[in-house]
Image (tube, grey):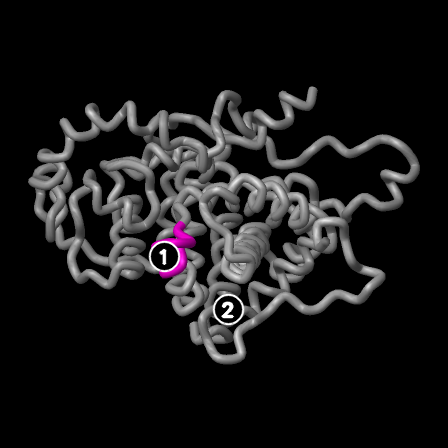
Amino acid sequence: AAEEEDDEDEVEVVMEDEDEEVESDGNERAADARVSHATSSAASSATSAPSHAVDEWDQVNALREEEEHVRAKEKAGEDRFEEDHFMGGEKTSFTSVSYVDAVRGIVDKIDVAALKPTLHVEDAPSRGCLACLFAPPRLEGDDLRRDRDEMFATARTKLDDENEVHLAVLHTLYTRLTGTDRAMPRYGKHWEELGFQGSDPATDLRGCGMLGLTQLLCLVTRSFTNAAAIHELSRDSTQEFPMAPLSINLTHTALKAVRRGLLNKEARRLGSVWAAADAFYCGAFYEFYLRWRDGGKTIMDSGHVKRELEDFLLTAKGTAHALALADSAKLGQAGESKPRKKAKAELEFVDF
């Protein structure tokens, strides 16, 4: 039973293209809630799953075996996707995309209703009186549940080379984080600058699909200064870490938090499960950055740091900490956020 639950925390599904749109009324309400939250966050900061998926952080060896296959596509990718993107034989200018437009563009192409019966959106409640007393509040309301379904359906959607919005998200992430002013080939070693572990970012994304990319775009949009500080540390000669696979792991953690009901209260406050999950994800990334940098961690510490961080985040206290940090963190700036000093009564074993 434990193995089944672990399997359901990972996502590896190949979807067929769907042209049908999601129900417009519910979709508009969920999208409007995310638009409102994304706008307010930017202003305040200066702007389930199938089994057999593997922890993305540990994919290096497996990915290297795929390099020969990827290299065969590299030349075609360079010809096809340089400064302009060719779509169906027609040359179109390739531009950046905002987080809000990316989410809308991706969800509009997903048949959420068809996927809904297969989505693992909520863990079974624990039995017993004590479990009932301390269980988080249940998620109520059709709009919130529809928003949650859309988020999990996005996690089931693979990167599609024929979808212009998907490629625009990749392009935007690369240009924003690296400072380049031109689109790069779809395949190539340049993606390793973002921490992807091979020439094809889609290989890393099979863990949680396009949700992994949209949440990384949310990180960049919510506070570019914080995202830039994380990217800079990930490229440090001593403390480097693979930023993109770490991001995907934190997206997995956010999905677990949603399934366990830990974000239900915040979702009601924001009017969106997706917005609550994004805030949790960003706060989790900021917490990782502080622990990694201040603890002088290196890649040899990665497994321990990940496990310890997830164990903390998937508690009521850890969830609240991540949500608070999402709005207050100022990484790499004067007066940046530091983990507050704990009172003696709050000390945990890991602090020693």
Q: Position of residue 302 (x, y in %)?
A: 51, 43
Q: Amino acid at mark 2?
A: Ser
Per the image, the residue denoted by label 1 is: 236
The span picked out in magenta is 231-240
Indicate left or right for 241 with 123 as reference: left
Magenta region, main secondary structure? loop
Give the spatial CA distance, label 1 vs label 2: 28 Å
Residue at 66 percent of width and 61 percent of height: 269
Number of marks in the image?
Answer: 2
Residue at 52 percent of width and 38 percent of height: 152
- Per the image, is 255 magenta? no
Indicate left or right for 212 with 265 as reference: left
| Residue 275 location, quadrant | bottom right
Q: Amino acid at mark 1?
A: Asp
Task: Tell me which label, 1 or 2, sits earlier in the chain.
Answer: 2
* Residue 96 at least partly seen: yes
Indicate left or right for 5 with 316 as reference: left
Q: Position of residue 133 (x, y in %)?
A: 89, 44
Q: Is residue 114 above or below residue 110?
A: above
Per the image, the residue denoted by label 2 is: 41
Indicate left or right for 82 with 142 as reference: left
Q: Nearer the viewer, residue 312 or 133?
A: 312
Element type at marker 1? loop
Extreme bottom residue here? 334
Q: Nearer the viewer, residue 49 or 189?
A: 189
Q: Quadrant of the N terminus?
A: top right
